[in-house]
Image: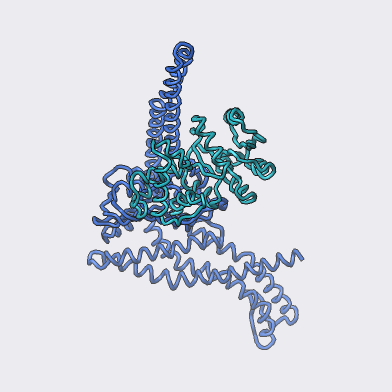
Chain colours: A cyan, B blue
Amino acid sequence: MRVVIAEDLALLRDGLIRLLEAFGFEVVEAVDNGPSLLRALTAHRPDVAVVDVRLPPTFTDEGLKAALEAREQVPGLPVLVLSQHVEQLYARELLSDSSGGIGYLLKDRVSDVSQFVDAVRRVAGGGTALDPDVVAQLLTRHAREEPLQALTPREREVLGLMAEGRSNAAIASSLFVTEKAISKHTNNIFSKLGLPPSEDDNRRVLAVLAYLGA
Amino acid sequence: MIDGDRGGEVVRTGLLTCVRGLVQVVVAQAVCIPLFVLTVLSIAFIPLGVGVVLAPVVLLAVRGVANTQRVWAAEWSGVPIPVPYRPEPDTRSPFRRLWWLLRDPATWRDVLWTVVNIPLGLLLGLLPAAMLVYGLEGVLVAPWLGRITFYGWGPFWPVDRFGPLSVAAAVALGAALTAFSFKAGPLVLKGHALFGQSLLAPARTTLALRVRELAETRSETVDASAAELRRIERDLHDGAQARLVALSMNIGLAEELMKRDPRAAQELLAEARSASGRALSELRDLVRGIHPPVLAERGLDGAVQALALTLPLPVDVRIDLPGRAEAPVESAAYFAVAEMLANIAKHSAATRAWIQIEHARDRLLMIVGDDGTGGADPAAGGGMRGIERRLAAFDGTMAVTSPPGGPTIVTMELPCALSSPRTSPSSGTG
């Protein structure tokens, strides 16, 4: 799988390259600023990009902006954004085109290597990987609102893991129940949130989006 | 052509000066005379009680005229006159308002200016126009009138006696006077502005008062930032630093155990990783408390939007900022709004909150409201008092209305200029 990395700190950049290469990714380019990130993304069209939010020249949200712009030019380009802090505002901006292939994680999640690599693969496959911090904020913020109150505590737990971007199998194993039980929960969640049944896997993204947009 | 343009410019400013001078005449006679009479009467009526209500109205009207004069002096003659008044007290009591006005030396200097301006405004206001009219008369009227009848134009030119020579001289002198009036008019007007400056600008006592006020807010700011630094030092020392020590200790131990007891080593490493996670999250909270990253990245607009998103209740956000304020002001404004929102979440029992931020007349206006139970009191100390002090460091103000039973509305104002138009997008409500 071909990866583009954008990270301005050389130490972290080298670490990311070593980590991803150890897991069989091919790092086609590693850049250290916003403009060259945009160029690299549109030129290489990688299978996935791992991008730091804060990049030169402005050291603000240059990486996020470059990623959003690249996704405008190359729709659906999978981007995993890493940040020293997570903001719902940024999560909402990233998920706004609902075409999937988006990840937004705290930088420290890199330390759990296998989960991080899993998140990169998920984003590359068109899925989402949302940081548990963002998800937790969403669930507390909307806990008072109508549709969510209809959910049972277990269903809320499942929605939380779903919002992080986990598959039913992964959710089942982390809650120590069968995958069948999880799919029953997810169907209940979809119907309580008013998302009509369809074969579309993006209903999971829509469920999260419904909360981000609310 | 350049000379022609310059000539046109001179004539234009000359004419404008005449009009402005005449405006000053009207102000001096039609405004200053009645205002002065009213001032004297209303102050004389204070013992009778009527004056208590009347005097503040009249004195504020005097301030209005004086402020107009300050603006005109700056715009017409380039003479800056700072506004010297003491800050308005936050009270509706007529006695306290009267006391505030009577105690301010600027009030008495305003009144003195009103009196002196009655003759001086008339004289200096008429002069530019009078010179111009008299000059033009010499060119256009005197020669003709001199032919018909005896006409003594100018101090020494009886126009009818010397025939063509005197006519030519009258025209020449009139033209010279006209040209002179164009040049001298603005100077006369500036003279009037300088007279205004001598009375309407802050007096020495006002400056002394302002210096004391600044010294107070500065020492509060210095104290507050010293305390803040101590807090950061303590948090780093007891938190992240201690965790990192424990972390490196665990890693060192794991290194030792690797060969003898791989299982125990693995457990230690897992522990080390979670300790590093906690250290990072502590550092993150610390950074957020000093200067939230989203504020640096998106400015006040984005940071407040992001803040609203994290609140456990719906918040309407309306922000209209054409640019960004300077970093310290922006930071003070952000923490003020953050504190108010935290109060709402903690104490108000509100179901909705709203934030409105706009910039007008060089002031940043922030209004935070909720539909909660009210009863918020900044005098009780705590976070609100701290914010009030922090805003005061920038000459900002805070007003709280929070009757028992609600709603609570906090209005905060910070004087500041905005720079560079915003570049980042901002979106809807939270």
Residue that extends furthest to the top in the rendered view of this protein? B260
> As rendered, which of B38 and B428 lies closer to the eye?
B428
User: What is the number of callouts on the image?
Assistant: 0
> As rendered, which of B294 and B227 lies closer to the eye?
B294
| Residue drawn 43% across the image and 36% down it | A173
Residue that extends furthest to the left in the rendered view of this protein? B48
What is the x, y in percent for residue B290? 44, 37
Residue that extends furthest to the right in the rendered view of this protein? B1
What is the x, y in percent for residue B295? 48, 44
Where is the N terminus of chain B found, in terms of image quarters?
bottom right
What is the x, y in percent for residue B370? 33, 55
Q: Quadrant of residue B78?
A: bottom right
Residue that extends furthest to the bottom in the rendered view of this protein? B148
What is the x, y in percent for residue B211? 41, 44
Is A63 placed left or right of B397 in the picture?
Answer: right
| Residue drawn 52% across the image and 61% down it | B73
> Does B107 appear above or below A122?
below
> Does B342 appear above or below B117?
above
> As rendered, which of A194 and B277 lies closer to the eye?
A194
| Residue drawn 61% across the image and 39% down it | A56
> Does B208 appear above or below A10?
below
Is B79 placed left or right of B101 in the picture?
Answer: right
Is B20 placed left or right of B202 in the picture?
Answer: right
Q: Quadrant of residue B339?
A: top left
Q: Is residue B85 visible?
A: no
Q: Is residue B343 visible?
A: yes
